[in-house]
Each structure stands twice: as C-alpha cells, then as structure tokens.
Image: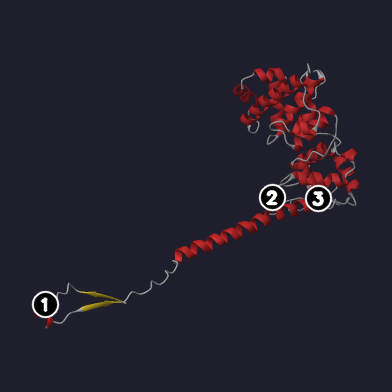
C-alpha cells in the first residue's frame, strides 16, 4: 500500500482545523494478458498447416509408389477365344485393299526410285504430318513436298513459312513445319558428331521418339515401314476403337470418350497377339475402320463377322 496526498501539507495552525484528504491507491498486480484470439488462431493454423504438410509429404510418395506397383503388377491380357476366326474374316473383307490407307498410307512413300536414306526420310515426314490429318490430305501434301525436293538438305534450306504453306492444310501445319525444320537440323548434327557422310533417320525406337513431333505410334510405324523392323503394334484411333469393339482389349474410356489412351491398347494387344501379326494388324484394322467398322454408323449389315462380333449392332463404342 502507498499513501499519496492531494497536495503539500504544511504545519500551519490555520490548516489544522481543515480536514486533510488523503487518497489511498492500492497497486494491483497486473494480471497476465490473455493471448488474443488472433494469436491463437494463427498458432493453431500454423500447427495445422505443419501437420497437413507432413501428412501430404508422406502421402504423395505412397500414392506414386502404389501406382507404380499396380503398373508393374498389371495382369497380362488373356488371348480371346475366337480371335483367329475374327481376324480371318477381317482379312477376307480387306482382300481388295480399297481403303484410303492402302493408297495413301506412310508405307507407300517408300519409293525405291529414291536412295534408301531419302526413302526413309520420306516415310518419317509422312508419319509426322499424318496426325490429325486425313490420308488423302496428307498424301497431297507429300506430293507437293516431293515435287519441291524432299531431302534433309532441302528442308534445312527452305524457309519455315514457305514450308508451312507447302504442307497446308494438314492439321497444325505451322507446328509441323517447325518440327520438320528442327528434325533436319538434329539429324544433320547427329551425322556430323558420328562422322557419317550420309544423313539418315534413327534406326531405333528411342532415337525416333526423341525427335520433335514424333510420338510412340509414329516411332513404331516408321521403324516398321522404313527399317522393316517391327518392335511393337502401331495403335491409332481405328485400331484402338475396333480392338475394344471386338473385346480384344478393355481400354475404352467410357467416362470421357474423347480422352483415350492408345498406349494401353498397344500393351494389351501385345500381351497375347503373336508377333508375326504386330506389323500387318495396323493397316488391316485401319482399312477395316475406314470402310466397314466406321467410327459412327458402322456397317454391320455388310460385315462378315457380325455373327461373332460382340459389339454387332451396338453403339456403345
């Protein structure tokens, strides 16, 4: 306790009769301040965030590991019971070879009147331009390129805009013109590094798929057509669709039909289809898909295998 007067106190007789007012102040111990709700919230949020980060940090790798394990443990696709009968029926329907792929496919551009390395380059360019492009449109563009002069040297010299106009209207012609120019530069540099006089396209899957604008399907196709080396099945939209209609594979994305994964189809087909069929199956099914087993309105009434086709007269795929 501390005493404090309201003013100075003089010992004066005149003031003795007056009351003296004394204020008494009690010093209270200051109570500890409570932490504000904001501080608590921030601290708790910080702890929660830290916990979430730790949990997520451990969960993500487990998820990836699980997917990797599932991919490794993918059960091989079993051989369909009547696939040989179905294949024979399709071969009979394709005996006339009257589909667009038979007239304008990439393999037709292996013209032996040109040097072998030039033929192989023609096949590569035809494959690069074929994506998102009808076969006749692609063939017409190839005709204009060959007339201009289609060699690695000529593709180095040509202006990119001029090249784009030559191959127009193939799908994404501007991008493809850039890819062709880049490919010519890459192949030339590779030949210089390896000390080769002749600039040629890669003869391996890894070498082809590393080129700009060349994917797995194109690499497999080019190896087969240009190098006569079958390393896998080339799966395009026709092979993917028909293989699922025939129940040879089960890879159709029902939830989003516009988002399909042909690589899954390739893997499942290669599980059971004998290797001697890997090369011919692509043009066989592509032509079948262009003439009979159409994407929309398949001509089941004209199909010789409609009696054993599991999707006959069905619009599910």
| CB contact under 8 Å: marks 2 and 3 | no
Q: Residue furthest bottom?
A: 17
Position of 64 relative to 123 (above/below): below
Please identify, in this view, whether the residue under mark 1 or under mark 2 is nearer the observer: 1
Image check: 244 left or right of 19?
right
Q: Secondary structure at mark 3?
A: helix
Of residue 89 and residue 162, the one placed in the foreground of this image is 162
* Picture coordinates of residue 80, whole percent (x, y): 88, 51
Of residue 52 and residue 270, the one placed in the foreground of this image is 52
Task: Measure how far apart labels 1 and 2 are at the Cα level.
Answer: 109 Å
Residue on which disc 2 sits: 257
Position of 240 relative to 36 (above/below): above
Position of 88 relative to 184 (above/below): below
For image coordinates 14% across by 76% down, the residue present is 11
Task: Measure how far apart labels 2 and 3 are at the Cα level.
Answer: 26 Å
- Residue 270 visible here: yes
């Amino acid at each position: 306790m501390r005493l404090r007067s309201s003013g100075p106190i003089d010992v004066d007789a005149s003031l003795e009769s007056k009351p003296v007012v004394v204020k008494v102040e009690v010093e209270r111990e200051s109570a500890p301040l409570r932490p504000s709700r904001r501080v608590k919230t921030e601290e708790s949020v910080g702890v929660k965030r830290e916990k979430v980060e730790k949990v997520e940090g451990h969960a993500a790798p487990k998820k990836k590991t699980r997917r990797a394990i599932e991919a490794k443990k993918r059960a091989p696709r079993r051989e369909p019971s009547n696939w040989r009968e179905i294949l024979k029926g399709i071969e009979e329907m394709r005996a006339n070879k009257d589909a667009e792929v038979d007239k304008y496919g990439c393999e037709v551009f292996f013209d032996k009147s040109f040097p072998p390395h030039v033929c192989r380059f023609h096949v590569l360019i035809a494959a690069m331009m074929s994506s998102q492009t009808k076969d006749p449109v692609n063939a017409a563009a190839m005709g204009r390129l060959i007339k201009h002069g289609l060699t690695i040297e000529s593709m180095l010299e040509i202006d990119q805009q001029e090249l784009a106009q030559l191959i127009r209207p193939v799908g994404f012609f501007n991008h493809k013109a850039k890819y062709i120019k880049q490919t010519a530069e890459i192949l030339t540099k590779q030949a210089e590094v390896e000390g080769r006089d002749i600039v040629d396209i890669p003869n391996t899957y890894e070498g082809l798929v590393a080129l700009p604008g060349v994917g797995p399907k194109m690499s497999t196709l080019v190896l087969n057509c240009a190098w006569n080396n079958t390393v896998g099945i080339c799966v395009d939209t026709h092979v993917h669709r028909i293989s699922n209609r025939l129940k040879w594979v089960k890879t159709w994305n029902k939830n989003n039909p516009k988002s399909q994964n042909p690589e899954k189809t390739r893997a499942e087909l290669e599980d059971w289809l004998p290797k001697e069929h890997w090369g011919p199956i692509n043009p066989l099914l592509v032509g079948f898909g262009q003439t009979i087993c159409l994407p929309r309105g398949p001509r089941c009434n004209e199909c010789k295998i409609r009696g054993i086709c599991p999707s006959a007269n069905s619009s599910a795929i």
